[in-house]
Amino acid sequence: MSNLPPQSLPVYATDEDIAVRAGGDWFLLAPSWQQMAAGTDGYFSPASPWVLRSTATNFGSNGVSHNQVVQLSSPKANFPGGGQLLAIDSVSTDGTSLTLRRLHKDLSVGQPPAPAAGLTGVTFTINTLDPQTEEASFDIKRRFGIDETIAYRSSTWVFDLRDLRMATVLTVLKDRYMAETRTERGDWSMKINLVRSQLDQVLDRVQVRWGPYGNSSEPSTVFSCKISR
C-alpha cells in the first residue's frame, strides 16, 4: 500500500499547458527531483520522425503519460542550445516508445524533431510539474466551491474547465518562480510580479458556470465563495 498523500482529481492543467506559457524557463522550473525518465540512448527509426524510442528506458513503467513534456538536448547538431521541448501525445502499449508532437499542435504538424532517415544518440529528459499542478487545482476548487463529493458541484458539472486552466497555469508558474528566486534582482523577480498580476486579473474575472449549458445555477466567483488556502 502506498503512503502517497491524498490527491485531488481532476487537475485543470498539464505540463504541456505550463510549458507553452513558461517557454524556455521550463528547463529550470521543472525540477530534476520530479523526473519521470531520462536517457542518452533515445532514437528515431527511419520514416518515424515523431516516435522516440529507448532501449534502456521503459516509459510506461516509469509512469510517463500523455501531455507531459520531453526535452531533447542532443545531438547538438539537431537540438542546439537548450534543446527542444515537445509534447507527449501517447505512450506505446509496451512502454518503449513515445509519439511526440509540437506543443498545442495536432499530430504530424510542424517540423519533425528527427530527419526521415532516423536519428540515434538522442538525449531526452522528462521532468514534470504534476505535484504543483495538483496543489494549484485543489486551491482553485476551494476558491470556487468545486467539490468532487457533492452532486452538481463536481468538476464534471463545470461548463468549461478551460476557464480554470489559465488560473492553474499561472498559479504553478508563480509558485515555481518564487521557489527558485534567491534575489530581488534579475528578470525572474520581474516575472514573479508580472505573473502575480496576471493571476490576480484572471481570478477576479473568472466565473465558474455550472451544468451542460452553463446556466444551471448562478456562476461562482471568488467574491461569492469563501476563499481558502
Image (spheres, helix red, strand yellow):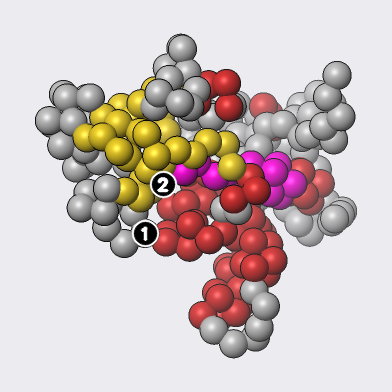
SS of the residue at dot 1? loop
Residue bearing mark 1: 82
Residue range in magenta is: 125-136
Q: Nearer the viewer, residue 163 or 67?
A: 67
Label 1 Cα neighbours within 10 Å, binned few <14 / some 14-19 / many ≥20? few
Residue at 17 percent across and 25 percent down: it is 46
Residue 71, numbered label: 2
Q: In this view, does 91 lie to the left or right of 188?
A: left
**Is residue 121 positioned above or below 58 on the image?**
below
Question: Is residue 213 in view?
Answer: yes
Q: Earlier in the sequence, mark 2 or mark 1?
A: 2
Q: Which residue lies furthest to the left in this view?
A: 117
User: Mark 2 touching mark 1, by CB under 8 A?
Assistant: yes
Amino acid under disc 2: Gln
Residue at 78 percent across and 34 percent down: it is 7
Q: In this view, does 140 lie to the left or right of 6?
A: left
Residue at 51 percent across and 80 percent down: it is 187
Label 2 Cα neighbours within 10 Å, binned few <14 / some 14-19 / many ≥20? many
Amino acid under disc 1: Gly
Residue 148 is covered by the magenta coloring: no
